């Protein structure tokens, strides 16, 4: 069968996580309108058959490309760099609502030298201004040795052309993962990401980038209920009160939304307890970063 790796790269908020979820058919990466939602390298696995030949594609979702220098940002940059190496193909995702930047063009020229096939995915065609989108397509057409595919990952529109393009450069091999496996991330990681996604949804704009989530307990009890305890870690004391909310209402809403999604994930009843802890400058503290799942050796 055809087996190989595909890195999904691009600037923040281009729609990379929405794209990988659409391709895999399962939610493997959390989604938010906020930039830098994805912090880790996320693996999504797709098994299938095309023209009578089986395949397994392993997609690597990555943080948005950024130039910040705190320890968390450096971890994220390393995840991007590592994902772009030793893959057969790269999908470089661009937000088609905006005029393509000089940085995007430079990234395209750089990444096409690192793999057998570079596919530029011009995303968000469902919401982009028609003239802007057409102008973006026209600016990509002259670039040699790339494939350009306009899509709407949100609507799952025009994803079909991606598969034969990617498979054209995949080697023959044995599957690397079981057929029923769609991500290599453990449940504790998925739970932490779901909680962080709900924080992105419910909290003010400046707070989510200052939080991490540590799942301190994950235990299936004798009655079948999964008991989960997690700390929401913030870097500022004044943010703790905002996360908790008046009478604890914000934290309750966040916990309820997270619990319902975790129950869908594990197909079972969940008891979820959240606490809020303050760890100043945690994004610069290697020990705390490791605790929260941002170990550089795993990037």
Image (tube, helix red, strand yellow):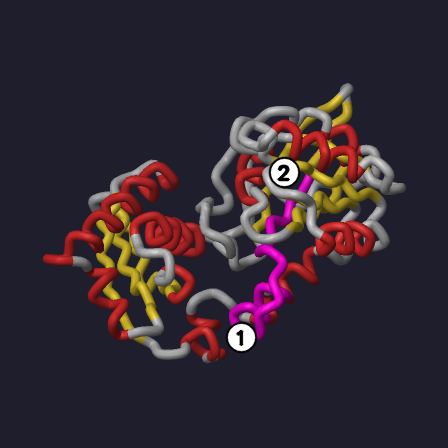
Q: Can you tell which mark lies on residue 71?
A: 1
Q: Is residue 178 visible?
A: no
Q: Which mark is residue 96?
A: 2
Query: Label 2 crowding class (10 Å Cα cut-off): few <14, some 14-19, many 20+?
Result: many
> Looking at the picture, how far across and down is residue 203, in whole percent?
30, 54
Find the distance from the CA under tag 1 to the CA under tag 2: 30 Å
Residue at image position (28%, 55%) is 228
User: Which residue sits at x=33%, y=68%?
Assistant: 233
> Residue 152 vs residue 144: left or right?
left
Closer to us: 98 or 237: 98
User: Quarter holding the N terminus?
Assistant: top right
Q: Earlier in the sequence, mark 1 or mark 2?
A: 1
Percent across and percent down for residue 149 are 72, 32
Magenta part of the protein: which range? 57-77
Query: Tag 1: Cα neighbours inside 10 Å, few (<14), some, or many (≥20)?
Result: some
Q: Find numbered disc 2 in the image and state the secondary structure of the residue it sits on.
A: loop
Q: Is residue 174 above or below residue 60?
A: above
Residue found 22% across the figure and 56% down from its top: 273
Q: Residue furthest right?
A: 144
The quarter holding residue 199 reads bottom left
**Is 61 in the magenta?**
yes
- Tell me the tag on residue 272: none
Q: Is residue 7 left or right of residue 152?
A: right
């Amino acid at each position: 069968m055809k087996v190989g790796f595909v890195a999904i790269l691009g600037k923040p908020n281009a729609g990379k996580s929405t794209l990988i979820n659409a391709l895999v058919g399962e939610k493997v990466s959390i989604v938010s309108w906020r930039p830098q939602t994805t912090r880790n390298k996320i693996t999504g696995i797709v098994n299938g058959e095309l023209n009578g030949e089986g395949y397994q594609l392993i997609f690597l979702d990555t943080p948005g490309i950024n130039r910040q220098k705190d320890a968390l940002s450096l971890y994220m940059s390393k995840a991007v760099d590592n994902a772009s190496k030793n893959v057969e193909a790269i999908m470089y995702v661009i937000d088609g609502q905006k005029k393509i930047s000089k940085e995007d063009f430079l990234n395209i020229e750089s990444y096409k030298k690192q793999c057998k096939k570079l596919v530029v995915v011009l995303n968000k065609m469902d919401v982009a201004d028609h003239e802007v989108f057409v102008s973006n397509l026209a600016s990509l057409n002259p670039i040699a040795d790339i494939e350009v595919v306009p899509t709407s990952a949100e609507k799952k529109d025009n994803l079909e052309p991606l598969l034969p393009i990617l498979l054209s450069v995949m080697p023959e091999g044995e599957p690397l993962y079981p057929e029923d496996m769609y991500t290599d991330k453990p449940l504790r990681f998925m739970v932490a990401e779901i909680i962080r996604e709900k924080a992105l949804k419910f909290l003010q704009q400046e707070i989510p980038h200052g939080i991490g989530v540590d799942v301190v307990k994950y235990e299936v009890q004798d009655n079948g209920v999964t008991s989960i305890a997690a700390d929401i870690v913030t870097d500022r004391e004044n943010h703790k009160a905002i996360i908790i909310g008046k009478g604890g209402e914000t934290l309750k809403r966040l916990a309820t939304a997270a619990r319902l999604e975790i129950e869908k994930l594990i197909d079972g009843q969940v008891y979820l307890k959240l606490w809020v802890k303050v760890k100043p400058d945690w994004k610069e503290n290697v020990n705390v970063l490791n605790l929260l799942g941002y170990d550089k050796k795993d990037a």
